[in-house]
Image (cartoon, rainbow, N blue to C red):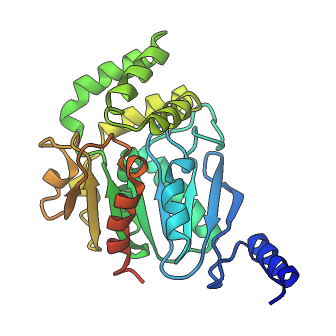
Amino acid sequence: MSLSKGLALAVAVLASGQGLGGQQSSERLLWVDGPAGRLRVSDGGSGGTPVLFVHSLAGNRSQWSGQLAHVRNSRRAVAFDMLGHGESDKPSGAAYSLESVAADIEAIVNELGLERFVLVGHSFGGGAVATYAGAHPNRVAGLFFVDPIGDQRSARTQIDMLVQMLQSPAYQSTAMMYYEAILVNATPDVRGEVLASLTQTSQEALVNAFRSIVEFDPAATLKSFSGPMFNVISDMNEFPTSLHNVISDLPTERMTGTSHWLHMDRPEEFNSLLDEFLAGRR
């Protein structure tokens, strides 16, 4: 092959977003109309059972960048900004609850034509994917939890106090203090990304999401879902109310020495665990 032909091939490959193996891995950004507002969605890759990633409260779709690039080498992967987060709409009066995120997931998968898929949810997003799977068990091929919320109903008093602070003039300092506490062990880059995303999140979304958390009953929510599940946690997620202690047969792996954003702190280690789970969901 001549140099000029090789250069032309390389340019064509880059332009198409394909690797030499022919796998489509480029990103397609689009808007999807959810029940309460527009959602910014990233779609890419092909092959295998698709994977839809749901970020944490005050996060955004870019927090999955290390997973999207990896998974799109072999299958389709989708991520989106929750309502009130990132580039998605921030409508006043929206519910911003676990149920509303589940409804947005439904709007996205229907728009993209995803019939059956794996859901990956981080923190609050873990509660959202559980809520969706409980309502649509036959569409979910598997649930992969990432340091998820558990059964917080017994912590209503503490969460109510946090909500009051988040509604006060001390909103910014309270939110920053809360997130700094769960960023212990984060890399400097991860810390910067997480706090930057926090500043872009709607105050109303943060407040109403915390209100929703205290109503979450994971055992009842997941009662109708019999598909495969896996749970990866940080050192900070060990309480009687943690999801793996509420769902007794939930396979769980601990990644020690990370922050709450363990998939961002150590993406290669995390991606290896995700690969193992996805290997059975072809």
Q: Position of residue 250 (x, y in %)?
A: 19, 63
Residue 92 position in % (x across, y down)? 61, 31
Q: Nearer the viewer, residue 122 or 13?
A: 13
Q: Which residue occupies the foreground of this view, 119 or 221?
A: 119
Left or right for 255, reference 52: left
Q: Nearer the viewer, residue 106 or 2?
A: 2
Residue 89 vertical position relative to residue 249 in the rendered view, above or below: above
Residue 267 x/y as whole percent: 41, 55
Residue at horizontal 34%, vertical 21%? 162
Q: Residue at x 18, y 34 (%)?
A: 154
* Quadrant placement of the N terminus: bottom right
Position of the C terminus, as image quadrant, is bottom left
Residue 64, relative to residue 238: is it above or below?
below
The number of numbered discs placed on residues in the rendered structure image is: 0
Q: Is residue 197 above or below residue 69?
A: above
Residue 140 lies in what quarter of the image?
Answer: bottom left
**Residue closest to the far bottom:** 1
Measured from the top left, where is residue 117 in percent x and y?
46, 73
Q: Nearer the viewer, residue 179 or 73?
A: 73
Answer left or right for 192 relative to 111: left
Apparent side of residue 124 relative to residue 206 in the rendered image (left or right): left
